[in-house]
Amino acid sequence: MGLIASLPEINKQRNAVFVMHEKSEKLIPLHTHNKGQLSYVEGGIAYITIDYKTYVVPARHYFWIPQGMPHILRIGNSATVLRSLYFYAHDDESNPFYKKLGIYPASELLIQMINYSERWDGKHVTPKDDNFEFLVALKKLLPQLNNKALPIILPTTDNEQMQPIIRFLEKNIGEKLTLEDVSKKFNISERSLSRLFQSSIHISFLQYLKTLRMVKAIELILKSNKPISEIAYNVGYTSISSFSDAFHEFTNSRPSDFRKS
C-alpha cells in the first residue's frame, strides 16, 4: 500500500502507531494526520512544504511533523526509501519537541530502531501488542537525542511575477547571477526586483540564490557521482573553498563528509 492510499488508514486507531516503509518517487498533496509523523530518509532526498516554505531533508536525516500540521511531501528520487512511523499524540504536551516541525541528522541508534520497525510494515501497533513498548521507547527517545535541527528552507510563492524569475534562476544556477543581470533580463529595476523578493518570499535575492545553490548541491551530491569540484562549478561557485564554507554554513558538514555519510 502506497502512502497516498494509506492516508485514511493512518488516522485510524488514535492510540496506536502506524508503521510504513516504502521506496518511491512521488508527490503527496496537502494533507494532515491526527498523529505525529516520524520519517527517516534512507537514501535520496525529500522535501516538505509548509506555509510556502520548502524544507529539504537529505539522506540519513529524519523529520518530525506534529499532529494536525498541513503539509505537502515530495520524495525526489526513485532511490529514496522513506521509513515512517505515525505516533499517537495524547502525550505530545510532555515535550516541546513534539509540537514543532524539525529536521535532524539521524544517529546510528535511531536508524537501527527505525529499521527494526520494518517487521510491522503496513500495520497498526496497539497497546495490546507485545512490541508496542518498543515504539513507545523510540518516541520518548527523540527529544533526548539533542540533535541540532537542519533548517535548509527554500521559500516558495504564488506571486505570478516571481514564477519566471525563479525558473530562470533554477535553470541558470551554474552561471554568475547578479541582481543587476537578473533585473535587466526581466526589464525591472534592481530596487524593484529586490523589493519583489522581500515582499513575496521574505528573504533577499542573494540569500535566495545562495539557498537555491545549496539545495541543488545537496541533490547532486546525493544523486550523482560527480566530483565535489564539478558540483561546486555546476551550482555557480568558482572556488572550492568558498563552496565548502557555504555548504558547511548550511549543513554543519563539509561536502566530502556529507557524501561519505
Image (tube, grey):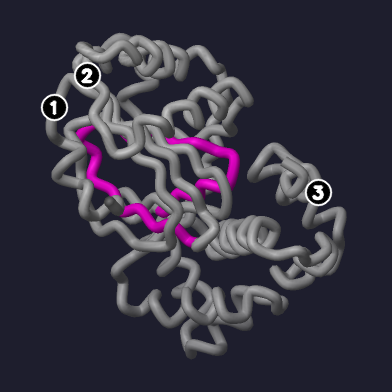
Classify mark 2: helix, strand or loop: loop
Which residue is label 2 attached to?
A: 126
Q: Amino acid at mark 3?
A: Ser
- Going from the N terminus, do you reach mark 3 or mark 2 first? 2
- Going from the N terminus, do you reach mark 1 or mark 2 first? 1
Q: Amino acid at mark 2?
A: Thr
Q: Position of residue 87 (x, y in %)?
A: 28, 25
Front disc: 3 or 2:
2
Decide: few, some or many residues near mark 2? Use Cα within 10 Å; few <14, some 14-19, many ≥20.
some
Q: Position of residue 3 (x, y in %)?
A: 29, 51
Give the extent of the magenta segment. 54-76
Between the residue at mark 1 and the residue at mark 2, the CA separation in whole angstroms equals: 8 Å
Q: Which mark is residue 256?
A: 3
**Residue 133 falls left or right of residue 44:** left
Rendering quarter of residue 145? top right
Which residue is label 1 attached to?
A: 13
Q: Amino acid at mark 1?
A: Gln
